[in-house]
Image: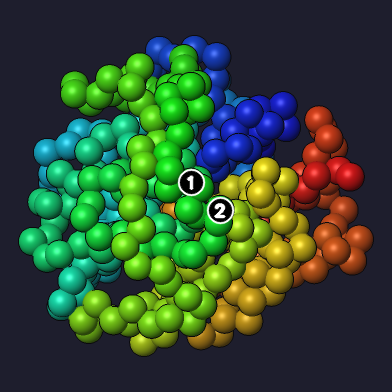
Amino acid sequence: MLRATFVLLILLTGCSESSPPETSSAAAVDDAELLDNASMDNEQVQNRGADKDNWWDTLPRPEWGQYEKIDQSEEWFEVYRIDDDIFAIYEPGQFEEVISFLIVGDDFALMFDTGLGIGNIRRVVDQLTDKNVVVLNSHTHYDHIGGNYLFDTIYGTALDYTKQKAMGSPPEDVAFFLQDGWVWKPLPPDFVAAEFQSRPFDIDQYVVEGEQIDIGGRVLEVLFTPGHAPDSICLLDRQNRQLFTGDTFYLAPLYTHLEGSSFAAYAQSAARLAGLADSIDEAITSHNVPVVDSRYMTALGQAFADIEAGNATDVTISDGNREYRFDGFSVIVRDD
């Protein structure tokens, strides 16, 4: 489970279930014991991250083994085909373990997030499709917009929060994410750590709640799901019964206590996603593992309802935060 002391450090900009150790020496990846993908087990939360000497010892996560790994030239990334026209672009070398998704339609492709900005994600995308690419971010925390500047067309919300994040952040705001123990893979040869920053980008078109983005053969419906961030969105593919959740849900601690986060808004979004559980077969998530069963949406809604009602009892309090544990994930709330 994340140490609450460490949680406070990563609140401002990113999300991961892993907490970095105090050493940066790369360890050989152990063969992970296969987990039951269907199990909803608290151990998935409790026994990763800060409880490990080296967080990368849990890699490769066994859930990735069921997907076809795609060869490509950029060693910082791993690419997996999770559906005929959906590619998960995974960054396991940094503790966020962020996942961006390339969704290829008949007419054009949509990038749902662009990762950390450590590696050149555009080079990966160009090896996967020759179609025009539109970027749409699940939200504008640094670990999801790092490669935006590499693309020509970017969609986004019209919220002031999004516009401010699109202005970028200087190196001093993100440099500590490269400190010892936070990165275990070699950095790309053309990466300059001193220049690492969230680069500015232009938003070419604003999206609205309920908008349907038809990429050709696949329609993605925009759902505003604030809480984790003011501009958090999900994408719903009703025909293929898939929900892209961004950081509104993943198998790890869910943050409601960041600057700009709102527990009340998150609870409403959780209830909304729970209402979609019977309409989808799977949720496609943006950290750690790419796909989880739709029943997690029901569990998400129930978790927030239990916290609001005072019925959530598996809780720890540290550094001004409460962490409520549920099966496979937890929710961190300010202890006001």
Question: How many marks on residues?
Answer: 2
Q: Which part of the image, by quadrant, shows the N terminus?
A: top right
Under tag 1, what secondary structure?
A: helix
Q: Which mark is residue 165?
A: 1
Q: Is residue 273 visible?
A: yes
Looking at the rendered structure, the kind of residue marked 1 is: Lys
Identify the residue position indicated by label 2 in the image. Answer: 161
The answer to whether mark 1 and mark 2 are in CB contact below 8 A is: yes
Q: What SS does tag 2 mark?
A: helix
Classify residue 83 by image quadrant: bottom left
Give, as a three-letter code, the residue at label 2. Tyr
Residue located 31% across and 62% down the image:
204
Residue 170 is situated, as x and y percent measured from the top left of the image, at 44, 28
Q: Quadrant of residue 216?
A: bottom left
Please state if 109 lies on the left or on the right of 299 as rendered. left
Q: Residue at x 89, y 45 (%)?
A: 336
Q: Residue at x 36, y 42 (%)?
A: 200
Pick whichever, 161 or 81, lies toward us. Answer: 161
Q: Is residue 67 visible?
A: no
